[in-house]
Amino acid sequence: MTQRNRSTPRPSPLTLTHPNAAGIDIGSASHFVAVPPDRDDEPVREFRSFTAELHRLADWLTACGVDTVAMESTGVYWIPLFELLDARGFTVLLVNARHVKNVTGRKSDVLDCQWLQQLLSYGLLRGAFRPGDAVCVLRALVRQRGAILRSQSRCVQHMQKALVQMNIQLATVLADVAGASGQAILRAIVAGERDGHQLAALADVRVKASAEEIAASLQGHWRAEHLFALRQALDAFDFCGQQLTECDREIEAQLQRLQVHEGKPAKGKKRSKSRNAPKTFDLRARLFQMCGVDLTRIDGVDVTTALVVVSEVGADMSKFPSDKHFSSWLNLCPGTKITGGKVMSGRTKRTANRATQALKLAAAALRTSQSALGAYYRRLCARMDKPKAVTAAAHKLARLIYAMLTKGEEYTDQGQAYYEERYRQRVIANLNRRAQQLGLQLAPIAPPPTPA
């Protein structure tokens, strides 16, 4: 028998950190709840998902002296119970189902809740991040707005399909059939106009295609069934626009409730307006009054990106001790798959986080930006493949947003030339250091004379 090395520390035994813990296995029709075995003769009970049963569940937990509850994030079935227990004063931990994988032979509804209760009792579970109630309301509204935008985009696809079936090649001469010119032409078609020249006259003067090209693209087969599909797609598009206006009104009201700062953001670099931004109010000013800083000063971050990030996280970053924790929550940090002291993989984890997706889209938009961030992104693209460069640039954007929200300082772009000069100085310093290690010395050469 080998003796234990005295220098190796002994593993500390598990200690009971949450003696008053309960575990809940969430289901669509019923929930299984487990409390410590010494609190009740029947420590595992089943409760229906009706509201009266949820109140009875909370009363039973109070009678058993429970103060901390763990539940898995199963679909959306956990939301009513989570909100009820949180309002009743319980500390509720919403845990990821992937982090609570059971050992072999422990898979059943009753044993799942007992397993959750045991893991929580020994402090082996951590709750997922969930913003405050007011931010949750804003998050639900912004997510609903995104769903309406996706429905509206599908309506545009249906319009394009109906046009192609009639061999109306309007999409080849107009950049967007959902724009002002495209909508004017489509509404005239639905109203009964068939003359291509009359329809082409409705196009805006800024359209690059000539009137003859537009008229030629509007010669097709006006079949009744395809015109009916076009009319219905156009009606659905208008209905989505009406719903979008109502949703924007609710978002503005919620942003007013979250307002903690006065004033308006200072005028900065002129940026192009986001197409999907609300048209009924100044979203940039509302976000500034909520956060105290103008996140759109960061290159690549427009008002819609800032709205998604703020609605998912909120303006209070106190739950993230550092920008590293914030980036880790976004799954933008490199992976740490290490075995035997060797790094096997640094791939980031896949995530459905909406804030992460918005930041990656913002990072991809830096491709043509003449800023320090744009130069940084293009430098990354030269070193690695594009998906990795997008993730690294999104990581940098996340750290900048964290710094602005925690320190309350505005972001100032130093420019592309500033970044390139700093990069040049770093390369020269590294070359000098390498030359000294080899016993050499670098000598600059005179620049070539400029031609007269």
Image (cartoon, rainbow, N blue to C red):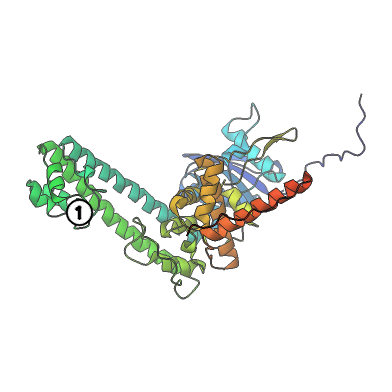
Q: Position of residue 75 (x, y in %)?
A: 48, 42
Residue 130 visible in the displayed image: no
The answer to whether 158 appears left or right of 258 in the picture is: left
Q: Position of residue 68 (x, y in %)?
A: 64, 51
Q: Nearer the viewer, residue 351 or 37?
A: 351
Q: Position of residue 283 (x, y in %)?
A: 40, 64
Report the residue that reaches farthest toward the bottom: 263
Circle 1 SS class: helix
Give the residue at mark 1: 181
Q: How many marks?
A: 1
Q: Nearer the viewer, residue 158 or 381?
A: 381
Residue 318 is drawn in which quadrant? bottom right
Q: Amino acid at mark 1?
A: Ser
Q: Residues within 10 Å of mark 1 (few under 14, many from 20)?
A: many
Report the residue that reaches farthest toward the top: 1
Q: Quadrant of the N terminus?
A: top right
Residue 249 visible in the displayed image: yes
Residue 404 is drawn in which quadrant? bottom right
The answer to whether 324 appears left or right of 260 in the picture is: right
For the point 54% across and 52% down, which residue is it? Answer: 376
The answer to whether 222 appears left or right of 145 in the picture is: left
| Above-or-below relation of 275 to 346 | below
Q: Nearer the viewer, residue 52 or 125?
A: 125
Q: Position of residue 97 (x, y in %)?
A: 57, 39
For the point 51% across and 66% down, which residue is it? Answer: 291
